[in-house]
Amino acid sequence: MTQTRATQIIQTISAWNASLPPEVRQQKYAKMAVSPFAFYRGTNHLYWQAFAGEARLARFGGVSTWLQGDLHAENFGAFTNDEGRVVYSVNDFDEAFFGDYQYDVWRMAISLGLGENVREKEQARVVATFAENYLETLGLWRAHEKLETEFSKKNTRGKLKKFLKEVEKENSRAKLLEKWTIPGGGRFDLTNDELDPVPDPRRDEILAALPGYLLTLSGAGNTFSVDHLHVKDLAVRLNAGTGSFGTPRYYLLVEGKSGLPQDDVILDVKRQTKPSAYAFLPAAERGLYDRLFVHDAHRAVIAYRAMTHNTDDYLGWMRLSDGSYLVRERTFVKEAFPLDALKDEEDFREMAGQWGGILASVHAQAARLPGARREVAFAQRVVDTVGKNRKAFVRLVEELGGYAWQVRTDWAAFERFIR
């Protein structure tokens, strides 16, 4: 890396995180410095700075859908849906926005190039498997095949299937409450170093915002009332995430349906800001974005509902004095697949193929295209755009995956700066 590039990267990261308190910024930087992958997680803005409006999008572009917006291997994960089943899919929508499907494909491809247990010469084959399965799944949607929109231990394979069986067996609501609340329930355990008490003015403000939050719920959530949402306790959530580290966040302990502590619900209340992509989009696209969404929690909720199946009944938003907050249930399963379980190229390719298929189905169901089946409409447009150039599409994704080398180089400069 030239000195100019290294200096530029440090200056960009410093400017992006300038609003964080010094101690929080230092903690975030320490998390980012652990590995190239952690650095990639914490610098989504560098990806968008490099690729927003990139000329190569035109080769297979022109088709938009809801994007996860910060896609990497750990923004897929296991969680429980509104019917209590353990499922696996994209699971973080803070950075979501509507745009060209290739942005998610490319960012995930770069993530695959950062795998610790796959050699550089093997990375292209892993990325190719991901891209091929993305296209193959869309081809099945286009052919009107009946495909899964929900992924679980029943329709996954290999190490992912084993992982989902294990997290289902090892996690429960009781264990979740045991981790975060005091014995007997009803109060958060403030001896947990990831929790702090909520200052009284903020506590009052959150409680006053609950009726407005109820109006944002949909589906079964429409049946909730203020009485049902009796809040037993509140806490500040600390030290969560990497890219969003330092973002204001709260946990609310809410009375469950039975009134007994065993089924208490924890609501995760997290402030939303503009997605990283926003700063790098053309002015016309930013203007459209501003007209479409009341605020950023509104955007995140719409994306969440579009990109998930059997969506959380508690999903909604509230307005507080310092911005808009996404509200959702903290499910008792919330696990990322352990990447260190992938020991060789074969493991990575099997997992990469499943990531590609899942992403294709998520993109298809999240599209807003006219027609009786939007999934088919999206798939048809992408497959027809790629046409007979499938190999060229895969080669392009491989080429973009090679940007992992630049991420590693930038991380090395950042790590030296921190050290």
Image (cartoon, rainbow, N blue to C red):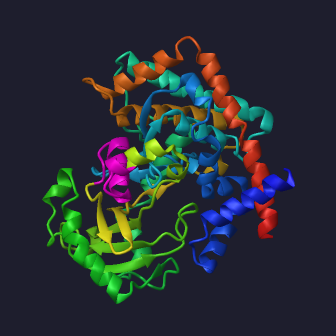
Is 303 part of what is drawn in magenta?
yes
Does residue 65 appear left or right of residue 209 in this picture? right
Q: Residue furthest front?
A: 283
- Taking the spot 39% from the left edge, 31% from the top edge, the residue there is 364
Q: Is residue 349 left or right of residue 209?
A: right
- Residue farthest along the top direction in this orientation: 388
Q: Nearer the viewer, residue 50 or 400?
A: 50
Q: Nearer the viewer, residue 409 or 344?
A: 409
x 64%, y 51%: residue:
46
413 versus 53 height, above or below: below
Q: How many marks?
A: 0
* Region rendered in magenta: 290-312
Above/below status of 151 relative to 339? above
Q: Is residue 417 above or below residue 369?
A: below
In percent of width and height, residue 57 lies at: 57, 30
Q: Nearer the viewer, residue 348 or 62?
A: 62
